[in-house]
Amino acid sequence: MPATNGKPTPVPPSAPTNSRKTSGGGFWRYLVVRFLLIIPTVFILVTLVFILMRTTGDPITAALGDRLTADQLAERVAAAGYDRPIFVQYLEYLGQIFTGNFGTTLSDNRPVLEVLLTYGAATLELAFYALIVAFIVGIPLGMVAAYFRDKTPDAILRVLAILAYATPVFFAGMLLKLIFSVWLKVLPVSGRGTTNTELEMQLLEGKTGIYLWDALRIGDPGIIGDVLAHAVLPGLTLGLLTAGIFLRLVRTNVIGTLSTDYVDAGRSRGVSEYRLVTKHAYRPALIPIITVIGLQIALLLGGAVLTETTFEWKGLGFQLSEYLQARDFVAVQGIVVLLAVIVALTNFIVDVIAALIDPRVRY
């Protein structure tokens, strides 16, 4: 420090650093970049779906070729514009999507957007139930497996996790139906509600399609219980698939966290192993769970096709299987595009949450 006449000269305080500002600016740049990446992702998926759907010819010939005469078929194909060059059809299809027009189904003559709005809520509700099951089952059992590392409970839980992940969804669904619906007769076999519940849902004004929410609006405990009873087996079937993944992730990350310095410091102070696992190690272990939720949403939506078909849960997966059997490629295109958008948006939201809570994420 310089001195004048033997006295130190005061040094002016340094200007405040702009690291916080820079960090904030970096976060918003990260946010914008991640959001903009949704556009090429959806664009590529839409293009692939369009090309794959055209590999067997135009949709009308595929869906109605065996029910129309040659003249009628040619007239329908020309009226729909499927006799034009494929590139022209592709550009027109992109323009329709950007304006929210997904076309009209060939098998039941309904706007595809109406199908998406009608059955999309059911699929999202099923995915919500499945995530609840995955969190309730996977996270606590993962902590138990880490606590009993390399012991008998850990070995049993790891085997169960592999079985939960590897078992086909339709087989798990039929097995649960056999046990709880046929043998024990405690849960419904299929559907989203009894006939009375379905009637009440149809008569409800401003219905959302999410049965639990609509049942709460009706306020009848019997209907609420019926909706929840019908949701148990489908939610359990689809949720166990993800629970196995969560169990292994939590186990691996809790074991890794237990070897860190701050946990060793707590152990040296006499903190019990149980408290170290439940109070100190599990929170950092949840960060990988959050980062993979986006991928699990895609897995859940894919599994929803088989789950909804097994339990006759009339959502997008159930309708997708129906339209595939009818070779209604217009409807299939619309449903797949919507699922792609949902997955892309979910991954964006998960990336943002991970960046906010995990300092190791660089932006």
Image: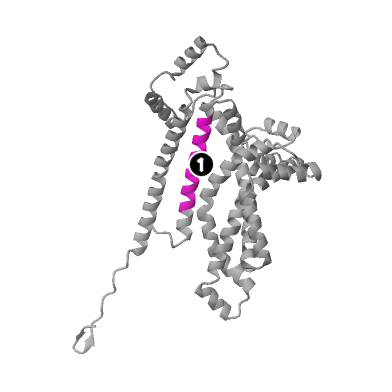
Residue found farthest to the top: 71
Q: Amino acid at mark 1?
A: Ile
Let me know if residue 221 is in the magenta part. Answer: no
Of the 4 image quadrants, the one containing the N terminus is bottom left
Which stretch did the figure color magenta? 332-351
Q: Please say if 103 is above or below 119.
A: above
Can I make out residue 11 in this image?
A: yes
Question: Which residue appears at 75% of the width and 32% of the height?
Answer: 195
Question: Which residue appears at 70% of the width and 45% of the height?
Answer: 232
Question: Which residue appears at 46% of the width and 48% of the height?
Answer: 348
Q: How many marks?
A: 1
Q: How is the image coloured?
A: one colour
- Our reading of the magenta stretch's main secondary structure is helix
Q: Position of residue 253 (x, y in %)?
A: 54, 63
Crowding around mark 1 (Cα neighbors within 10 Å: few <14, some 14 to 19, many 20+) is some
Q: Quadrant of residue 361?
A: bottom left
Q: Which residue does the numbered mark 1 point to in the structure image?
A: 342
Q: Quadrant of residue 94?
A: top left
Question: Which residue appears at 47% of the width and 13% of the height?
Answer: 74
Q: Nearer the viewer, residue 149 or 238?
A: 149
Q: Nearer the viewer, residue 161 or 7?
A: 161
Let me know if residue 335 is in the magenta part. Answer: yes
Q: Position of residue 140 (x, y in %)?
A: 64, 60
Q: Please say if 47 is above or below 327.
A: below
Q: Position of residue 219 (x, y in %)?
A: 72, 41
Of the 4 image quadrants, the one containing the C terminus is bottom left
Q: Position of residue 315 (x, y in %)?
A: 61, 35
In this rendering, position of residue 272 left or right of residue 346: right
Can I make out residue 132 in this image?
A: no
